[in-house]
Amino acid sequence: MSYVRLVNVTKRFGDVTAVDNLNYEIGKGECFSMLGPSGCGKTTTLRMVAGFEDLSDGEVWVGDRLLSSPKKNHYVPPEKRNFGMVFQAFAVWPHLSVYENVAFPLRIRKLDEKEIDQRTMDALKATNLVKAKDESPDFLSGGGKQRVALARALAINPDVMLLDEPLSSLDPHLREEMRFEIKDLQQKYGFSIIYVTHDQSEAMALSDRILVMKLGVVQQIDTPLNIYNNPANKFVFSFIGLSNFLSVKNDGSLVLPNHEGNIPQSFTLPERLVGEADLSLASRPSEIDFTTMEDPEGLHGVVTRKAFLGEIVDYQIKIGDQFMRVQKSRRDKGPEPGENCALHLLRPFWYAENE
Ligand code: ATP
């Protein structure tokens, strides 16, 4: 059942349309990520949901409560939206103790002292900050500061948590740990999350569903698994996972530029691309097997690089004058740099070159 609902949400800054006719619905307790490159409109969307930014058009709803609608001249200010917010920069106040940082929004809401104490202590317990409650956040690590920001957002018992790149200032190890902490808190408190990030692995690890955005326009909304397995277009393919493409010419038959070998017989184009002259052939690096040079399904190339990455081995294969990446388990025996090889693409994806 939908809980947060964006209907035809549009934001224009002068000539720039930062968010273009955005529609989505989020369920109660769902973790929903907005993923896309810098400047695609993620933060602007989150600010509109939070109430910090006016909409140029459209509506934002939570449950049956309308929050923003320029047409209806309706606007609920941020402090009346009951949203928790955590942003990239550690927005904690060094002149207040950890306890007072967390209690602050409750004081603004003029709750009585007993309730403030109870909610503050609950949030501090949930984020493992009880021991540090009387210290200045300045004495905490980056992870600690971000926990204070999370605790402060939790204390208001939010319906929705808006998180804008909340982990990007942390080192990789801590980032991973905090992902689990956020997920645990969500399960305990039951709030919905809108999570903004340009980090695909973060979005994949945390989200029930992901929205992929490009230049203010939605490209795909689906579960992490479906987005990975069935990317809607070339942009989504390359944004979720490695960009792994070969340019292919199509003049009735398929030709790889400057490539001596044959194109495997089983390569057939999807109906929508049959008349397209310039194509991209894509494959997930993990969905390519090495096969024998005699295999008619083999795409011939030469190994130009082999990198040991721990659990996986990453190969760069030169095919004509282009490159593909192949990733295999370290337990598989694969070819060595300089050797000829043949690739079997288990699940090829086809796109128009300029899609
Ligand atoms: P990042 O990850 O870098 O924050 P983003 O995906 O969150 O990127 P936005 O910050 O939402 O993207 O920006 C979307 C577009 O809107 C960009 O072209 C940006 O320059 C423009 N923009 C954002 N805020 C303003 C503003 N206050 N005035 C004018 N243009 C703006």
Image (cartoon, rainbow, N blue to C red):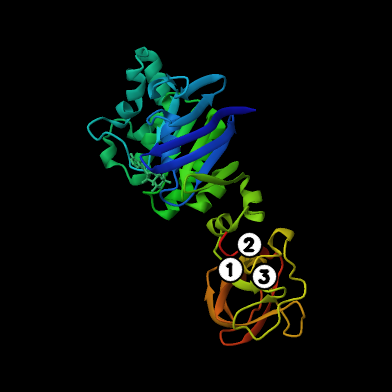
- Image: 50 above or below 352: above
Residue type at tag 3: Ile
- Name the residue nearer the viewer: 31 or 137: 31
* Structural crowding at the residue carrying mark 1, measured as other residues with C-alpha within 10 Å and reported as few (<14), some (14–19) or many (≥20): many
Q: Residue at x 64, y 79 (%)?
A: 334
Work out whether residue 132 or residue 210 is closer to the camera in this orientation and state it. Answer: 210
- Which is nearer the eye, 237 or 178? 237
Q: Is residue 253 above or below residue 116?
A: below
Residue 42 location (% of width, % of height): 45, 42
The amino acid marked with disc number 2 is: Tyr
Mark 1 or mark 3, which is nearer the start of the sequence?
1
The disc label shown at residue 319, or none? none
Q: Secondary structure at mark 2?
A: strand
Q: How far is the residue under mark 2 from the one under mark 1? A: 10 Å
Which circle, 3 or 1, is nearer the viewer? 1
User: Do we see residue 331 in this rendering?
Assistant: no
Is 271 displayed left or right of 40 in the figure? right
Residue type indicated by callout 1: Phe
Give the x, y percent position of residue 314: 56, 72
Which residue shows up at 38% across the image and 22% down it? Answer: 79
Residue marked by disc 1: 245
- Residue 146 visible in rendering: yes
Residue assigned mark 3: 288
Reading the image, the residue beneath label 2 is 351
Determine whether label 3 and label 2 are within 8 Å by CB: no
Quarter placement of the C terminus = bottom right
